[in-house]
Amino acid sequence: MKKMIKIKILLFIGLTFIFFAGCSDSDSANSKLDSFKKAVEEDDAEALYDLVEVGEGIHWSAKHAQDVIDNYNRTENNYSMQIEEFEEQLEAIENDDPIDNEKNKFYFDEDGDIQVRGYEYHTNNSGLENADEIIFTVEDIDEEFVVEGPFNEDEIIIGIFGPGNITFEATAKHDDKEITDKNTVEMNSADYQRFEKEVSLSLGGQSADVTTDIPNTIILNNGSEVEEIVDKGEVNMIEKGSEIQGVQKTPWGEIVSEPLSYEGNDMSYDITPHIFMNESDRKEITRVIDYYYSQLYDALTEDDKSILADVSATKEVIASHDKDFDDIGGNNLDSYFGGEVQKTTVDFGDASVTDEGYLEVHADIYSNFQYFITEYDESSKDEMRYQFKTIHLNKLDSGDWEIVHQEGNFRGSDEPNLKGDHLSEAK
């Protein structure tokens, strides 16, 4: 009888302990819910971050806690749904029922602790099949996430992170080349019950279509040679903001296209070389052309070919003016040439390479030079005109430039023929 009484007493004590223990767990969970509400209402991210439990392998920060609070304040429905989930879980804890905690950004576990939901983030492997490794960093998370290649799967898992607006910066290493991209994945309505998120990153490099009007154009990507093309080609593994340029090389130097910035779009980039860049050669060529026409006009004015003896031009070029000398006093007329060069402008922004391999440039000769006939009214003799010339030059082994061809008549226009950013002048 006494034994039976003792058993009943022990059973009563045990049930009482369980009851109060359950009440204690429930009270603690209710207190945590109140603290959660207070942190949100008072916009206290640090309090929220300290309140919740961050499970092993989940990365989260107070900054991300602030993102959640901002989201709740902007979208009241998100907050009310979270509180409803909490209250249902609390009721399950009080009744010792199974807890449904497979939804929303936070949840109560069976011990009455508020847990942070973990979201698995991944990116795709487009263009990364041969990459060596990818290094990910996350804003406000003091840790690097390194994923080693080869990347044979469609998805590359980065890690597990709590709710928030997660900003990723990633660098993919392709042999000696690195490609970096950055993107932020923001919270959305799918976060309620979908716990996998994709980060859109361009780490395999994009490709840019390029065209040229000149065969044997070399493509440069940020100054490095990519390949040689005839009319069109493609620059692979290129980053947004990269500089694309075309180059045509010759024994005397090179001409280039304007550098173009790749903007990550589908447009085709024209990299036809047309600019002669060498500054010292520019000055020398301008001097050679200016001196040639100054001497030529003086020689025709004085009817003295010997004045052309020291110009930098081939014998064939000098001989091409024999007809002009023959026209002086011809046809029984007292005809003559007169005038002088005041300024020479050479355009190095519309340069090209001839089939013979010479440099072709255009020049404006600003002059009052013209052909006069006895009966001609000389009232226009002081009028200055821009005479347009096309000139081919060759660079000799000595380093000097020589005119090998020139064409253009002595008539001129009132306005300059040449415009652009690559003009060189001699006066």
Image (tube, grey):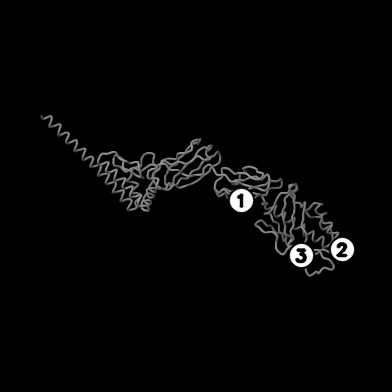
Label number found at residue 298: none
Label number found at residue 259: 1
Question: At 49% across and 41% down in the image, what residue appears?
Answer: 124
Residue 316, above or below 4: below
Q: Which residue is mark 2?
A: 329
**Residue nearest the observer in this picture, 240 or 80:** 80
Residue 230, above or below 290: above
Percent coordinates x, y for residue 86 in the rendering: 30, 45
Structural crowding at the residue carrying mark 2, measured as other residues with C-alpha within 10 Å and reported as few (<14), some (14–19) or many (≥20): some
Question: At 71% across and 59% down in the image, what residue appears?
Answer: 345
Badge 1 element: loop
Structural crowding at the residue carrying mark 1, measured as other residues with C-alpha within 10 Å and reported as few (<14), some (14–19) or many (≥20): some
> With 265 as the anchor, is 386 left or right in this view?
right
Question: At 66% across and 49% down in the image, what residue appears?
Answer: 273
Earlier-in-chain disc, 1 versus 3 = 1
Residue extending farthest to the right is: 332
Q: How many marks?
A: 3
Q: Amino acid at mark 1?
A: Pro
Residue 129, above or below 366: above
Q: Amino acid at mark 3?
A: Asn
> With 30 as the anchor, is 389 left or right in this view?
right
Percent coordinates x, y for residue 114 in the rendering: 32, 43
Q: Which residue is mark 3?
A: 368
